[in-house]
Image: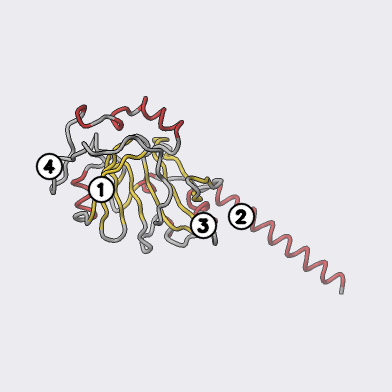
Amino acid sequence: MKQKWFSAGVFGALVFTLLLAWTGAAGAQAKLLEEDFVCNTVTLGDEDDKVIAAFGTPIYDRTVRISGILVKECDFNGEFTVGFAVSTGKVVDITIKNKKYEARNGVRYGATSAWIQQTYGVKKPRRIDGNKFYVYDNPKDRFQHLMLQMNTEDNSLMVMRITALPLDDVERQELMIRKPELFREKEQKSVWFIPSEKEIDMSAMPEDKPIRLGGLTE
């Protein structure tokens, strides 16, 4: 009897070891692709006409300052939010709360951390503003990030975000040197507009605030 229990234990340990090895190998082979930074044909750096063609007319918009960058956030049907840098008029942020939206390899709301890492690669989670994220940098532009916010209770995917906004003060300082156009104010750059408006009034904008990347699910 003891021998049977021992054999069963050895077999179970072997299966577990093989499973770990397979998961590790899958994670090692996983990598980011260009399509991982695209949502409904829209990618970072696109202009408003392409966004409207893909998502329709925004149902709500607001202008906020995020880590020193003025951002016009537009909400669209289906729980998609696209942020434009006011100084350039180009997309700098895409937030996806749509529970039916499916990214590459079936990654969607509720995906497990194992499935995420098997798709995009093995990563240690990061804490940003009290929230847990898997953050992947675009190999072609390290200032672009794929952020996957995880439910801390069951470690499943809640929100997907594709962003060119700095994640911390160090990145912000470097971005100010590499891409200063993002931080220019109204008088330094021609005003961006979408079909529904000709100008953005920034006279009442508050002073610069710390980075705001957390609280995506609120």
Query: Which sits earlier in the primary sequence, circle 3 or circle 1?
Result: 1
Q: Residue furthest bottom?
A: 1
Q: Amino acid at mark 1?
A: Arg
Q: Position of residue 68 (x, y in %)?
A: 34, 34
First in residue order: circle 3 vs circle 2: 2
Question: Of helix, strand and loop, which one carries label 1?
Answer: strand
Q: Amino acid at mark 4?
A: Lys
Residue that mark 2 sits on: 22
At mark 4, the secondary structure is: loop
Q: Earlier in the sequence, mark 3 or mark 4?
A: 3
The label on residue 62 is 1
Query: Which of the two discs, 2 and 4, labels the residue nearer the N terminus?
Result: 2
Vertical arrangement, residue 167 with respect to residue 36, above or below: above
Instruction: Give the Cα distance between marks 2 and 4.
Output: 55 Å
For residue 4, above or below residue 58: below
Q: Which residue has dot 4 on it?
A: 198
Provide the residue designation for mark 3. 115
Q: Amino acid at mark 3?
A: Trp
Tag 3–tag 1 contact (CB < 8 Å): no
Q: Residue furthest top?
A: 177
Structural distance between the alpha carbons of marks 2 and 1:
46 Å
Left or right of 33 on screen, residue 185 = left
